[in-house]
Image (cartoon, grey):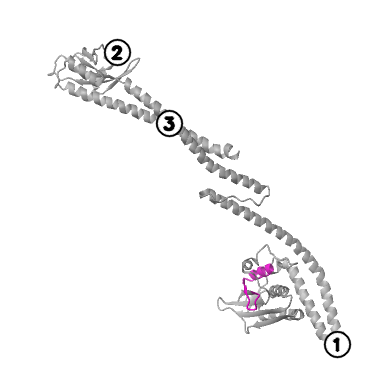
Amino acid sequence: MFGRKGIHRRLLVPYLLTLIAAIFAAWWIATTILTRSLEQRLDNRLQHAATVIASGDLPLTDELLVRVGRLLDASVILLTPDGQVGKSLSADGPRAVPADWRRDWQDAVVSGAPLTLESATQAFMVVARPIEVSHDPRYATLLLVSSLGDIRQAARQAALWLGVAAVLGALVIAWVGHRIALTITEPIKRLAQAADQVAAGNRDVHIDTSDSGEMGTLNHAFNAMVQSLEDYETQASVQSRYAALGEMAARVAHEVRNPLTAIKMQIQLLAEVQGPESADTCNRLVDEVRRLELIVNALLQQGQSSAPQLAPADLNLIVDDVVQLFRPHLEHQGITLETAQREQLPLVSVDADRMKQVIVNLLVNARDVLRDGGTIRIETAAAAQDGEVVLSVSDSGPGIPADRRDTLFRAPPASTKPQGLGLGLRLVGELVQAHGGRLAVAESDLGGALFRIFLPAGPAQ
């Protein structure tokens, strides 16, 4: 498994090694401190007793020395001025002194510091004090010798119990560490499995984000990454689709443009031949052909990425050109085209042909939703603030739901028309943005949709 053989082991093994080292160090330190504490306590007792006895306040009788030996669990040795053993008593009475002790305790006699003597079977602590001469001239030095066997036995026993407790504690802490490691590795394992599924092409993967802390943040980021990846793939698919459609449309438009030119010329010649009685009909046909040419040009220019050629222009004149082309066609469908244009409108910096594309697309969208007739209104005005000129296109159609207004001009495009591709409004958004303008969608007082285009006023820089 990923967790057990991978990161879980890399977390747990160093943790256990560190734990074992720390517990062993703690056990050794505790045992050493305990042993030294017990020995220090014994040393204090022996030194205090040796100081009291050697001070001369007590008679150095055998009875007294035996009682002291019992009280301290020690042997009492009196040395003569020449360093010989004058008397040696233990709790049980006289006691022989090993010969090697006589050499070793000289250090304690000279320095006055406690001395530890090691024999083959046990260890002893020796404390020496000079005896007052006035107390008993026969003896010059008092030695108290106590076995360290009981202390070291107690220390070993304590060390054993401490070791058992340390092992049990280590097992408990190791188990806790194992569980803690699992809380880290298991979410990572689930994340890795989810990543494998995403790599295999599954985009429906979702990780629970209820975890707190860094894992919760990581899970949130993973889900966001999968969603972004899905959106990117969807967008890439749509872009590829529309790139192919755009290329096809450009080819069709290129082939259609020349016949349209020929048709327009033939109609114009026909008007000259037929005379004034057919002029209105022929002019309308020419206007329709011009509108078709405008649409064809829009198709040819759709794939172009060049920046618009900005120049000072009167927005009212641009609107008039488009209205003259569209009004007959709209009236034929029972649609009333109203205009409300402000006089002496400030000039705008626009590409006139591209701006006509914008207006044409908005009119086509409005026409398509007014299948049973209705009203379309085009208005121009100067904004109250920011030095902008406003172009508004509204209709009496069903309108646009509020939850769709923010996504109308963003890819991937979508259309509610049976045969629509959703390119019209997307193209409008791109062209307005290229002109440094902005778009707003609202509800029209006619009952349908209202598109407002805000363009910066002033000549091109």
Query: Is label 1 or label 3 in front?
Result: 3
23 over 400 or under it: above or below: above
Q: How many neighbours does mark 2 have within 10 angstroms: few (below 14), some (14-19), or many (20 or more)?
A: few
Q: How many neighbours does mark 1 have within 10 angstroms: few (below 14), some (14-19), or many (20 or more)?
A: few
Membership of 131 in magenta stretch: no
Can residue 24 be seen here? no
Q: Position of residue 378 (x, y in %)?
A: 67, 79
Distance, label 2 to label 3, CA atoms, is: 41 Å
Q: Nearer the viewer, residue 365 or 385?
A: 365
> Mark 1 or mark 3: which comes first in sequence?
3
Residue identified by numbered label 1: 275
341 over 71 or under it: above or below: below
Dot 3 falls on a residue whose secondary structure is helix
Query: Is label 2 or label 3 in front?
Result: 3
Q: Residue 372's quadrant in the figure? A: bottom right
The three-letter amino acid code for the residue at tag 2 is Asp
Left-right relation of 274 to 239: right
Q: How many neighbours does mark 3 have within 10 angstroms: few (below 14), some (14-19), or many (20 or more)?
A: some
Residue identified by numbered label 2: 100
Q: State the residue lying farthest toward the right.
A: 273
Membership of 437 in magenta stretch: yes
Q: Which residues are magenta?
A: 425-450
Left-right relation of 36 to 201: left
> Mark 2 or mark 3: which comes first in sequence?
2
209 over 281 or under it: above or below: above
Residue identified by numbered label 3: 166
Q: Position of residue 376 (x, y in %)?
A: 69, 78
Q: What's the residue at 33%, 15% (across, down)?
A: 119
